[in-house]
Amino acid sequence: MVYRLRVPQSVENLIRGLHPGLKRKVRAGLDVIRENPAAGKELRDDLAGLHSLRVGRFRIIYRIAPKRLIELVALGPRRTIYEDTVRLLRRERGPRR
């Protein structure tokens, strides 16, 4: 059974701006995730609960949600995506007390 995909506007804008060859690879990666969400690597530590799928030098970071839903969290080059995602999640959660 195919999962539904929720893509934030920021990630959609990033995909639109990619080089056509990379855009095709990313869209193929999204199809893989929709068919088999466990295809990506489970992340640990600050990114526990998320998965990462390799698409060339890029990574698709996503969360498997209930009711057959995949939530894209981030997309970017392997060199910076994990640190960027940690910062994004901290910003979403707000300041710690």
Image (tube, rainbow, N blue to C red):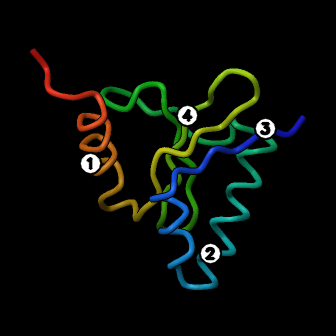
The answer to whether residue 36 is above or below residue 84 is above
Sequence-wise, which precedes: disc 2 or disc 1? 2
Sequence-wise, which precedes: disc 4 or disc 2? 2
**Disc 3, disc 1: CB below 8 Å?**
no
Three-letter amino acid code at the position of disc 4 = Arg
Image quadrant where residue 87 sits: top left
Sequence-wise, which precedes: disc 1 or disc 4? 4
Q: Is residue 7 left or right of residue 57?
A: right
Sequence-wise, which precedes: disc 3 or disc 4? 3
Comparing marks 1 and 4, which lies closer to the viewer?
4
**In the depicted view, which residue is nearer to us: 54 or 90?**
90
Sequence-wise, which precedes: disc 2 or disc 3? 3
Mark pair 2, 3: CA separation: 20 Å
Image quadrant where residue 45 sits: top left
Crowding near pointer 4: few (<14 within 10 Å), some, many (20+)?
some
Three-letter amino acid code at the position of disc 3 = Tyr
Q: Residue furthest right?
A: 1
Q: Residue furthest left?
A: 97
Measuring from the top left, give residue 10's x and y in whole percent: 45, 59
Task: Name the secondary structure under disc 4.
Answer: strand
Pointer 2 residue:
23
Mark pair 4, 2: CA separation: 21 Å
Three-letter amino acid code at the position of disc 1 = Glu
Pointer 3 residue:
3
Pointer 4 residue:
63
Q: Any mark on residue 83, and which?
A: 1
Mark pair 3, 4: CA separation: 12 Å
Mark pair 3, 1: CA separation: 27 Å
